[in-house]
Image (tube, grey):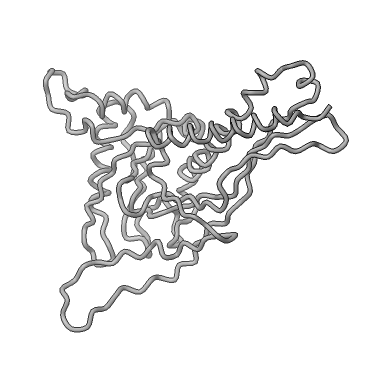
Amino acid sequence: MGMPIWLEKGLRTDFAVKMVEFLAGRIKSPGLMKAVMTIPSNSSYEKMGWIGAMPGVQEWVGELKAKSFEQYDYTIKNKDWAAAVPINENDIDDDQIGVLGKIPALLVRRIMAHPEKLLIALLTGGTTNLAYDGVAYFSDVSGVRTFDNLLAGTGTTLAQLEADLNAAQVAMAKFTDDQGEALNIVGDMIVCPKALENKFGRLVNSQTDPTASAQGTFNPYAGKYTIVADARLDAADANDWYLLASNEIFSPLVLSMRKEPEEKIEKVPGTKTYNMSADGRYNVGYGLPLLAVKTVNS
């Protein structure tokens, strides 16, 4: 027998329902996606050189001169991504419908969470991968880059994290535009390994200063940061962490979306197996390095 029409229709409907539920949950708790600018794409790649254009404000005297877009050759190439689960006709014959009913939720979770995996890889590779200006995304001051968003940490004790968070926030606020004007950027998201999650949680969620011995002391970090902890960062380096600014017009990270994930159910020729898959076409890239600081602990 083939796949019954009612089962195929049910699987497709469940996929659509789970997709809606996932997107609703992401609105409530966006996590790392809050620091991502999603760009609808209509070609095989998106040219992102314009992302470096940040005009300053000057006194208007005489003819108004707009800042020209820099001709940066930075592109994000869209790629095809897919996840698939096999469905065997024997399982349908044996009435394993309850198990098969879990497949749409599994596929939605896998394909929709996949961009976050790519984004984490961007962060961990940011000391070598290049941003739009041809300099490593996380870099010290260079000929082109006039700011330092790659900082040396002092350690991972609670007091050391407090000192380094303050240093990262001050450094980010002092980043300047091409007119030399301080931008006063406010970092509001800490992206860290799971190994540091509890310490950062104590630091930014305690109403009183957790680094002070006396109770009732003011905690200047309380309520100002979202913490995103990811075990994939532990694998790269369990002591390094990132401060991102997620509330600016531009974003520190970019998602180019060519085709939203959708489901397919196809028979594998010459077998008793169907593949239910979810595939999309998209890719990620770097936004403004001004909006991100990496703190490295040796």
Kindly give the residue lying farthest to the bottom in the view shown: 62
The percent position of residue 33, horizontal first and vertical second, equals 42, 41
45 left or right of 227?
Answer: right
Residue 263 figure quarter: top right
User: Which image quadrant: the N terminus?
Assistant: top right
- Residue at image x 41%, y 47%? 36
Observer-nearest of 24 and 56: 24
137 left or right of 45?
Answer: left
The percent position of residue 119, horizontal first and vertical second, equals 48, 43
- Residue at image x 46%, y 37%? 23
Give the number of marks.
0
Observer-nearest of 229 and 249: 249
- Residue at image x 37%, y 27%? 196
The percent position of residue 104, horizontal first and vertical second, equals 61, 30
Q: Is residue 178 above or below residue 264?
A: below
254 left or right of 205?
Answer: right
The percent position of residue 151, horizontal first and vertical second, equals 34, 45
Observer-nearest of 254 and 143: 254
Q: Is residue 243 above or below residue 215?
A: below
Observer-nearest of 190 and 100: 100
Kindly give the residue lying farthest to the right in the view shown: 270
Q: Is residue 88 above or below residue 39?
A: above
Q: Is residue 122 above or below residue 91?
A: below
105 left or right of 147?
Answer: right
Residue 93 figure quarter: top right
User: Which image quadrant: the C terminus?
Assistant: top left
